[in-house]
Amino acid sequence: MSNELELRHYFAIIRKRLVFILLFVVLCSAAAAIYSIYFKDKMYEASTKIIVNQTASQLATGQLDINQINSNIKMIETYKEIIKTPAILDKVASQYPGLELTAEQLASKIRVSSVNNTQVMTLVVQDIHYRKAAETVNAVSLIFQEEIQNIFKVENVSILNSADPEASPGAVSPNVPLNIAIAFVVSLMLAVGVVFLLEYLDDTIKTEEDVLEYLGQPTLAMISKMNTEEAKSGGKQVSNQTYKAGEFERVTIEK
């Protein structure tokens, strides 16, 4: 029963400030939509795929060495780290000056991922211009393919597909519906939290129920608010009526 009363109390608090909650949520959601559509730069994504395959000797003999495949899979994690090192990115920056990117900037743009238990890596680059993103990811892939042979003395890294600089894909960011949904949820949580905080800090007594709850006493009388005109008219009526102390007609007895 007490839990039910507490829930009713919580719902009463929310209902009392429902207008504030709705207004806050609507404003935050609208602000997120406006920022995502008109102010946040659109980002485009280009990607390439690189595979660590069999060595030249294995391809010539047609043999499938499971141990070699497992070794290549384990080397994927090493390759993922090498791609973002100055050994690769410094050469990209020097050989492709048209990109106008330093090694540090390239490292912040590149995202490398791989599917578990496969020999395939995916390189992804995001930029406000798709063509530049495609040219950057292709340049990194080519330099990596060339330099990894000198670093590990291997010849088993191939580029499966390159990004097409002439393509016209849609922007991957910002995701307007997702941003609005996040703003809606976060603003709703904040608004409800602020409402409960204000209710917790408010120690004033406003209703008869508050008097009974906090003081444990019933309400004997209430003084209503009066505007200026009501106060003046009420004052005149009171001033026209005079009573003597002790008049019995002004005394009432309650049982």
Image: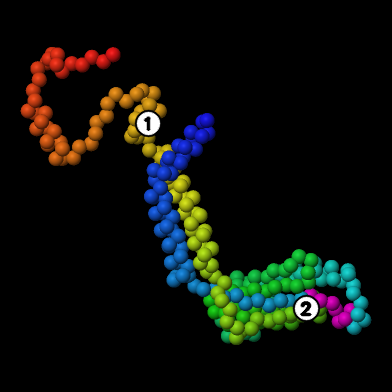
Image position of 234 (left or right of 182):
left
Which of the pair 197/58 is nearer the observer? 197
In percent of width and height, residue 197 lies at 43, 42
Which of the pair 148/201 is nearer the observer? 201
> Does residue 162 appear in the picture of this structure?
yes
Q: Is residue 202 above or below residue 108?
A: above
Image position of 76 (left or right of 84):
right
In percent of width and height, residue 89 lies at 65, 77
Q: Residue at x 53, y 67 (%)?
A: 175
In percent of width and height, residue 123 lies at 67, 74
The label on residue 157 is: 2
Q: Is residue 58 magenta?
A: yes
Protein image colouring: rainbow
Q: Residue at x 49, y 35 (%)?
A: 6
Labels 1, 2: front one: 1
Image position of 34 (left or right of 77):
left
The label on residue 146 is: none
Could you tell me the amino acid type at mark 2? Val
Which residue has dot 1 on it? 210
- Quadrant of the rendered image containing residue 209: top left
Q: Disc 1 on helix, strand or loop?
A: helix
Q: Which residues are magenta?
A: 52-59
Could you tell me the amino acid type at mark 1? Asp
Local packing at callout 1 (Cα closer than 10 Å; few below 14, some 14-19, many 20+) is some
Q: Residue at x 52, y 69 (%)?
A: 174
Q: Which quadrant: the C terminus?
A: top left
Q: Is residue 112 above or below residue 18?
A: below
- Distance of mark 1 from mark 2, alpha carbons? 76 Å
Q: Is residue 195 magenta?
A: no
In the current view of this chain or complex, which residue is farthest to the left?
Answer: 240
Contact? badges 1 and 2 (CB < 8 Å): no
- Which of the two labelled residues, at mark 1 and mark 2, occupies the earlier sequence position? 2
